[in-house]
Image (cartoon, grey):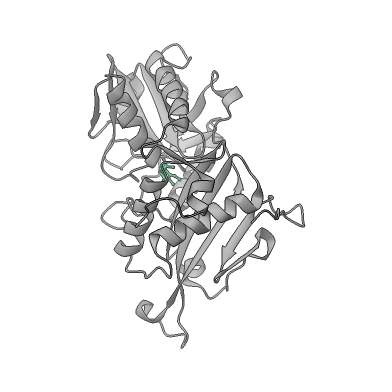
Amino acid sequence: MSEQVTSPTEAYPPGAAFIDGRFAEIADAKISVLDWGFLRSDATYDVVHVWKGRFFRLDSHLDRFMASAEKLRMNLPYGRAQIAEILAQLVERTGFEDAYVEMIVTRGVSPTFSRDPRDAINRFIAFAIPFGWILKPEEREKGLAIAVSEIPRIQPESVDPTVKNYHWLDLVMGMFDAYEQGARTCLLSDGQGNVTEGPGFNIFVVKDGKVSTPQRGVLHGITRQASMLLLEELQVPISERPVSLAELHDADEVFATSTAGGVMPVTSIGAHTVATGKPGAITNRLIEAYWAAHTRGDGWSVPVADVSRGQLDLA
Ligand code: PLP
């Protein structure tokens, strides 16, 4: 566990992986081209992060991952506590203080190559790589430039967005739309005039001191959940409800939330500047509370070492 695993080639970030029941180098963690996770995006995943040696909201990520696998009728080859230990051991192998830790279950391959998903043997994969940011801390003051794409998000009746998934073609093509509008990333609507989410983040608007975030048609992000809890503590009113594109453009503050970067001010939407073009007061208070929560116990954060030694009650 103390041995450092790093990537042998520059094509891969340094890191460590766990695949087909073993720990492996990131560069060696490969799946069959016949895996339905690859052929059909038939997979679910979750990403938890480690900050200064502590997992953030690990229980919430594990809850979501276990629930997602169940909703997709997949059988995980490991229980919740075992998965937590695998994740912790991966982080320890890398020696990273700050890490991005992904767990995946794919439908796998049917041993008879039948077309029946019930025949497939589900595959569990996990890896730890360096922490990555959608918006780096030094870019926070400038904020995120987003653009609303013409492409609507896949409807939730077709693909359940609360099951974290790789059905990203709407988001990826939306990013190309956003680049053409000079923005950094995109936001998709529900096709009926309401905001949904962007590639890897949820969205919040602030108007007259009240915060709102869409509830329907989005992944219930763990950073979104953490932000709602922290806003309650800060006694800022928060509601989950449909948020129209008109409200987005009329907002006093807009921010995005993601495991990959936390709470991120959005300062422009296409050609429109949000309020003064600077991060707003509520966004700034939330950013502070979010990073302060990384040293809190009580389900907020836990040392990686406590998880790898099985000292947690993760039953
Ligand atoms: N929405 C989508 C589509 C995502 O993929 C993600 C994370 O990758 C999020 C929202 C944010 O979720 P979380 O806060 O759990 O990272």
**Count of numbered badges drawn on the protein:** 0
| Residue drawn where x is 31% and y is 19% of the image | 234
| Residue drawn where x is 28% and y is 36% of the image | 214
| Rendering quarter of residue 32 | bottom right
Q: Position of residue 282 (x, y in %)?
A: 37, 17
Of all residues, the one furthest to the right in this rendering is 9
Locate the N terminus by quadrant.
bottom right
| Residue drawn where x is 48% and y is 50% of the image | 307
For residue 269, say whether it is visible: no
Q: Position of residue 24 (x, y in %)?
A: 64, 64
Give 183 or 310, whichever is nearer the viewer.
Answer: 310
For residue 194, say whether it is visible: yes
- The quadrant of the picture showing ligand 1 is top left
Give the vertical position of 182 relative to 75 (above or below).
above
| Residue drawn where x is 53% and y is 52% of the image | 88
Locate the C terminus by quadrant.
bottom left
Describe residue 128's horizontal placement relative to residue 79 as left or right. right
Q: Position of residue 284 (x, y in %)?
A: 44, 18
Give 152 or 233, whichever is nearer the viewer.
Answer: 233
